[in-house]
Amino acid sequence: MNVRLVDKVSNISKREFHEKYLSANRPVILKDLAKDWKATNKWTFDFFRKTYGHWEIPMYDKSYHNPGNGYMKPVTYKKFSDYLDIIENEPCKLRFHNFQIMKRAPELSQDYSTPEIMDGFFKFALMFFGGKGSALNLHYDIDCSNVFLTHFQTIKEVYLFPPEEAKYLYQLPFTNHAHVDVLKPDWEEFPAFKYTHCYKAEIHHGETLFIPRLWWHYVYYSEGGFSLALRANESLSSRARGLWNIVRLFTVDTGMNFLAGHRWKDYKDNKARANAVLAMQKIKSV
């Protein structure tokens, strides 16, 4: 696996961003996209603890994609203040993710503004919280949107792979994810992964990572922290593909997990391995 660092830029114009990154389908870290947001100074562990600490929130861990009744469901619930105490001070494998926090606390939308760096932003936003050492498995965003991920307080690492390399990532059929541990890959189980080209992004407080649509990414919390994700999609065709992906996931994949459980998981694993073997054979035949 070859690794290169994602560019970091400041004061980039909409035109330059479009030419160098959006049209080129390349990730980039925007150092100052959020510099004028209230959230950049206001959103701290203490702020969320004091203001929303009474919430009961769903917790997820690496068992998120295990087959059976717990497939893609929370493993437990915690009081938000208790969870923040943990991730601020010690390692924790539990994550709180894909939370449409503005539905529950709409006043938070006053603390950030929709970027003008491109067109097609959606109104809703998602927040992600994680403890040191936790990770979000390798995946691409199912709705095929471009993602602008702004991190707060600490540091987060994101490992990205272009969409054309999905064949080496052991993508599970009918899903948008894979089981390769990017930081500690099992080379015997996933030999094709060595052919990938990876981009590493280290996002510091107030910086925004642009993740182009369909790019695979593995998110690792090198420190406990939290991020805000805004999404944009100005392409009707990619919006349609995203809708189809969502329908496919919540009908075929979720339905077959309910009906077949471990047999469905085994089918997906075997199909992913077979596709990767074919990809490796094509490389060796060149």
Image (cartoon, rainbow, N blue to C red):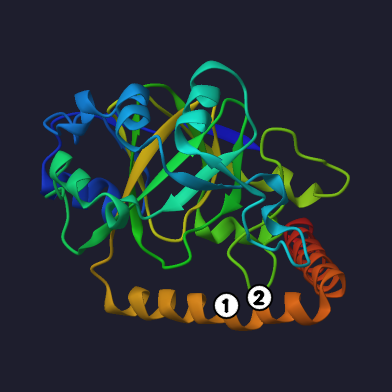
Q: Position of residue 252 (x, y in %)?
A: 65, 82
- Residue closer to the observer: 276 or 54: 54
What is the spatial separation of the Cα atoms under label 2 and label 1, in whole angstroms? Answer: 5 Å
Note whether residue 222 is visible.
no
Secondary structure beneath disc 1? helix
> Horizontally, is 193 left or right of 42 in the view?
right
- Residue closer to the observer: 201 or 71: 71
Q: Position of residue 151 (x, y in %)?
A: 35, 33
Could you tell me which residue is drawn at 53 percent across and 25 percent down? Answer: 87
What crowding class fits label 1: few (fewer than 14 Cα within 10 Å), some (14-19), or many (20 or more)?
few
Q: Quadrant of the N terminus?
A: top right
Q: What residue is pinned by disc 1?
A: 250
Secondary structure beneath disc 2? helix
Could you tell me which residue is drawn at 37 percent across and 81 percent down? Answer: 240
Q: Say above or below: 163 vs 256.
A: above
What crowding class fits label 2: few (fewer than 14 Cα within 10 Å), some (14-19), or many (20 or more)?
many
Three-letter residue code for mark 2: Thr
> Horizontally, is 196 left or right of 121 in the view?
right
Q: Position of residue 106 (x, y in %)?
A: 21, 52
Kindly identify which numbered label has been placed on residue 254.
Answer: 2
Residue contact at pointers 2 and 1, CB within 8 angstroms:
yes
Three-letter residue code for mark 1: Phe
Q: Residue furthest top?
A: 89
Q: Residue furthest front?
A: 54
> Horizontally, is 193 left or right of 269 in the view?
left
Note whether residue 88 is visible.
yes
- Residue closer to the observer: 16 or 141: 141
Q: Quadrant of the C terminus?
A: bottom right
Q: Say above or below: 77 vs 164.
A: above
Could you tell me which residue is drawn at 60 percent across and 83 percent down? Answer: 251
Kindly identify which numbered label has been placed on residue 229.
Answer: none
